[in-house]
Image (spheres, coloured by chain):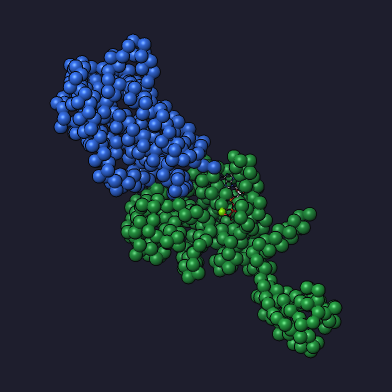
Amino acid sequence: MTAIVDIRDLQKTYASGHLALSGITLAIAEGEILALLGPNGAGKTTLISTICGLVRPTSGRVTVGGHDIVTDWRAARRMIGLVPQEIALEPFESVAKTVAMSRGLFGLRRDDAAIEQVLTSLTLWDKRDAQIKELSGGMKRRVLIAKALAHEPRVLFLDEPTAGVDVELRRGMWDVVADLKSRGTTIILTTHYIEEAEAIADRIGVIDKGRLQLVEGKSALMARMGRKELRIALRAPLAAVPDQLLGRVTLADGGLTLVYGYDTRADRTGITTLLADLATEGIVLRDLSTRQSSLEEIFLSLLAAGQESAA
Amino acid sequence: MNWPAVTVIYRQEMARFRRTILQSFVSPVLSTSLYFVVFGTAIGSRIPTIEGNSYGAFIVPGLIMLSVMTQSLSNASFAIYFPKFVGSVYEVLSAPVGVAEIVLGYVGAAATKSLFIGVVILGTAALFVDLTIAHPGAMLAFLVLTCVAFALMGFIIGLWAGNFEQLQLIPLLIVTPLIFLGGAFYSISMLPPFWQGVSLFNPVVWLISGFRWSFFGAADVPVAASLVAIALFLAVCLGVIAWIFRTGWRLRA
Ligand SMILES: Nc1ncnc2c1ncn2[C@@H]1O[C@H](COP(=O)(O)OP(=O)(O)OP(=O)(O)O)[C@@H](O)[C@H]1O
Ligand SMILES: [Mg+2]
């Protein structure tokens, strides 16, 4: 694998003394989409900002396309597009001008056709003459993406690109990302939405407390994350799990609830059989509910598992 | 050197200027006219000629310097403080753009604006008093150099400032007094000897004196010294800016 972004033992301690990145080592292949997940304050933005030149690394080394981000920063940065987490735009500029400006900043000559193409792909062409301050939040976020794409970067960083974006638009952005990938762009994005990582990423990295806890192919990780729980409320409490159901369910709520875990991705969830078995046992149901583990719970279990295997 | 970047930064700043062109044009014309009515006509008529010039003509160079210096400071400090404030500075900092391109773009535009204002004031002044410029080439050179030097200083203030109050602080508390006490409206030679000596520590004295020499051929301090003063001023500002960008001070975490 030739890594287009190669991060070696990257460390960042802020002036406040806070250790935000602690020994991150990660190689990102050309053309892949990597989703970074992690709780608030994990260090995702710090990692991206360091690679893009907004935060100075304390130690470690990063290359982009073989160019060191510190010693050969011009060549490295020319390859990078960045969509920051916070909306940060000049309020009085027009959409088309601010996107054209981005192109110039990255050393490219003015090219109206290229700008039109970028604006059209993000459905911003109708708004090209509007001032930034007249746009809605979702539109501003798309302007940020347009700015990042204006110089045709080979590596694109998207820091929570779909925060505060409606469902339809979110899918639109996924299409944009898929289109970029098909043209060979490498994409690193952060998100708090598991469906988003699932929908577009090839690999998923989990960061917590400045450490990369794991990086894994999406399918493998999703299989582990895809567990769901069926909770069955009973009319009368059970003293113990009936023999026939032993090993399949557990009792909760003082015997008033049966809990059944299953994998949504499996061919057979076993729910039909379970319900049939309950009927033959003569157990009367009061209510049914299912819940999926939240991303935070999944993190916690992943992180706990990581600590166990480390111990 | 990333010239497209210099061009887009310069153009963006000039566009900001054009959006407020009326204000940029009207306010110097109005304030200059007021100065002439008050100092030139009302008070100046009771003041004898200074070094052979009517008081109205004498204050023209000082008046231009006063406006050009304060405008350069505020234009350049705002130009970099505003993107810091709204956060859009991230793009310049993550682009393949070095300190040279940033300074050329932002400081170049700020200096252009105040040069424009300086020329407008000169034109307005010519309506009120008879002006002959002894050394037009030198006059232009002093004007441009002063615009650039104070724009550089303003740029530093904008980089340093953490809020809008700080943005005003140094211009208000330090620079404006230095300009008023720098002989904008009087000749240093009119002061008692002790205060003449003190005045020489005010860098603005050297700038205004040189500029006035280019109009009337007479100066408070030698013209060569004025040139050295400007060169020094430019060098110090450029040095500070280079240091800021090398260390990332107040720009990069
Ligand atoms: N400029 C700074 N100075 C000091 N500490 C900082 C600075 N920026 C971030 N931090 C700290 O570094 C840690 C990592 O922050 P970072 O923004 O990278 O988190 P994140 O993973 O992007 O979180 P979120 O999901 O909330 O965006 C946090 O504890 C934060 O408080
Ligand atoms: Mg973040």
Q: Give the quarter of the image for residue B170.
A: top left
Q: What is chain A's hue in the picture? A: green
Q: On the picture, is A14 further left or further right than A99?
A: right
**Looking at the picture, how far across and down is residue A102, in whole percent?**
40, 51
Name above or below for residue B99 compared with residue A171.
above
Q: On the picture, is A217 further left or further right than A151?
A: right
Q: What is chain B's hue in the picture? A: blue
- Closest to the observer, A255 or B216: A255
Q: On the picture, is A207 further left or further right than B125?
A: right
Q: Is residue A32 visible?
A: no
Quadrant location of the N terminus of chain A in the rendered image: bottom right
Quadrant location of the C terminus of chain A in the rendered image: bottom right
Name above or below for residue A58 compared with residue A170.
above
Q: Is residue A214 visible?
A: yes
- Closest to the observer, B242 or B152: B152
Instruction: Kindly identify the residue that appears in the image at 44 percent across and 48 percent down.
Output: B86
